[in-house]
């Protein structure tokens, strides 16, 4: 990053959704122009994927169509499908904007918004459409799993500002619910506990941080602002702003750790107050 350049471009926090999307799209195009100039080998790719499009939803629809197409599922068909879905649901565009901003602000390896749009499979995998066309939704789930190694059931409910960091091996079940401003690392499973149907998957509150390799099973609630340690196996409810670690997961107690002050899903702090921790059954 050039000296003096801020990691986070300034944009009013109170911007309206359309204004924020327009600002972000202008940033993405400016970044792409700079990248095309500095790396001519990518100029054609950047033009066809970003610079030739008039909006974020058109660029994203084109990019997803090319990523997910196959010999029997044509990119032009997918482009029209995704674009119609974005056009018919403004919330999808605002969610995409929030997810891009989440990756840019929380992942120090995210070089730019355009880098996330083009290369972050965790971002691309969760831009799911919500129309009630079950056979097609399931077919797209299969393609997303094949291409990105991320398995998100189309029945799952996802909030805004979600970061799937690295994303490989993430599995999210049909009745799972993920709130806003949640961060989830690779090889996380939000699964059921058996073959029974119904509401059987975890409910993740706003601002939760789930570490790499964690498994949360059953219709359990992870409270707002909670933290799940890497490799943990969670089978019971975790209170808001608590920390759970281990297999099976246990709540961590300490002078301050039992009620985290920050929002872990946004701070990405996996090890705060470690010196004060003591483990209880």
Image (cartoon, grey):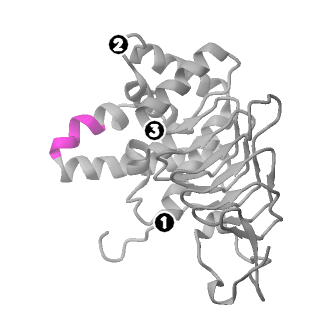
In the rendered view, would you say 233 is above or below 276?
above
Report the magenta residues as a range.
40-46
x and y, in percent, of residue 38 in the image: 19, 53
| Image quarter of the N terminus | bottom left
The percent position of residue 93, horizontal first and vertical second, equals: 60, 37
Q: The C terminus appears in which quarter of the rendering?
A: bottom right
Q: Are marks 3 and 1 in contact (CB under 8 Å)?
A: no
Which label sits on residue 33? none
Provide the major secondary structure of the magenta segment: helix
Q: Secondary structure beneath disc 2?
A: loop
Residue indicated by mark 1: 8
Crowd class of label 1 (few under 14; some 14 to 19; many from 20; radius 10 Å): few
Residue in the picture at 49% in, 30% down: 144
Few, some or many residues within 10 Å of mark 3 (<14, 14–19, 20+): some
Badge 2 local density, few (<14 within 10 Å), some, or many (20+)? few
Who's the residue at 70% across and 45% down the image?
A: 159
Q: Which secondary structure lies at badge 1?
A: loop
Q: Is residue 49 above or below residue 229?
A: above
Q: Which label belongs to residue 71?
A: 2
Measure how far apart labels 3 and 1 are at the Cα level. 29 Å
Label 3: which residue?
A: 149
Front disc: 3 or 1? 3
Residue 153 image offset from top left, x and y in percent: 63, 32
């Amino acid at each position: 990053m050039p000296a003096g350049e801020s990691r986070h471009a300034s944009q009013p926090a109170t911007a309206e959704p359309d204004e924020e999307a327009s600002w972000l799209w202008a940033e993405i195009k400016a970044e792409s122009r700079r990248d095309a100039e500095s790396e001519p080998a990518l100029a054609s790719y950047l033009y066809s994927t970003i610079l030739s499009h008039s909006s974020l939803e058109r660029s994203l629809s084109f990019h997803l169509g090319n990523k997910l197409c196959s010999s029997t599922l044509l990119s032009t068909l997918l482009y029209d499908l995704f674009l119609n879905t974005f056009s018919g649901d403004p919330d999808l565009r605002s969610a995409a904007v929030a997810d891009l901003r989440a990756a840019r602000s929380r992942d120090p390896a995210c070089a730019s918004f355009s880098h996330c749009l083009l290369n972050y499979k965790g971002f691309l995998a969760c831009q799911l459409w919500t129309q009630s066309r079950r056979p097609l939704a399931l077919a797209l789930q299969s393609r997303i799993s094949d291409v990105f190694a991320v398995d998100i059931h189309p029945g799952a409910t996802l909030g805004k500002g979600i970061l799937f960091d690295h994303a490989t091996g993430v599995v999210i079940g049909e009745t799972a619910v993920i709130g806003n401003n949640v961060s989830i690392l690779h090889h996380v499973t939000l699964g059921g506990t058996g073959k029974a149907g119904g509401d059987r998957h975890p409910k993740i509150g706003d601002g939760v941080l789930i570490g790499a390799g964690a498994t949360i099973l059953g219709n359990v609630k992870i409270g707002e602002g909670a933290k799940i340690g890497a490799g943990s196996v969670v089978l019971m409810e975790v209170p808001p702003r608590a920390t759970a670690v281990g297999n099976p997961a246990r709540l961590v107690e300490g002078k301050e750790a039992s009620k985290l002050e920050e929002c872990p899903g946004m701070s990405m702090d996996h090890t705060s107050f470690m010196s004060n921790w003591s483990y209880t059954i």
